[in-house]
Image (spheres, rainbow, N blue to C red):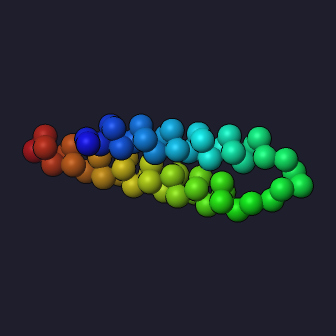
Amino acid sequence: MNELDRLTIYSVLCFLCFCALVLRPSHEVSLLPIVGMLATIFGIWFETRYWRESSNNRQA
């Protein structure tokens, strides 16, 4: 898988975690969607940071 594929997967997972967080009834509290959303945001940040560095290395 290339960088764009991994970034797409992280984006879809972030969207699913957000939907699970928003669509859950207020009386059912679960930290799993929040943890999943934070993990996917970190994954997106890591991929974009690594992607920029690797693309700069390829251009040089």
Q: Residue 11: x and y, percent?
A: 49, 40
Q: Nearer the viewer, residue 59 or 16?
A: 16
Q: Quadrant of the C terminus?
A: top left
Q: Is residue 3 left or right of residue 30?
A: left
Residue 36 is situated, as x and y percent measured from the top left of the image, at 58, 56
Residue 42 appears left or right of 1: right
Image check: 12 left or right of 2? right
The answer to which of 60 and 50 lies nearer the viewer is 50
Q: Position of residue 29 (x, y in %)?
A: 81, 59
Rendered residue at 51%/52% (across/down)? 40
Relative to 39, residue 11 above or below: above
Q: Give how far across and how far down residue 5 sits, in percent.
A: 33, 38
Which quadrant would the N terminus be assigned to in this image? Answer: top left
Residue at horizontal 56%, vertical 45%? 14
Q: Residue shown at 52%/44% (left/top)? A: 13
Residue situated furthest left in the rendering: 60
How many numbered badges does the structure rendering display?
Answer: 0
Residue drawn at x 36%, y 44% as measured from the top left: 6
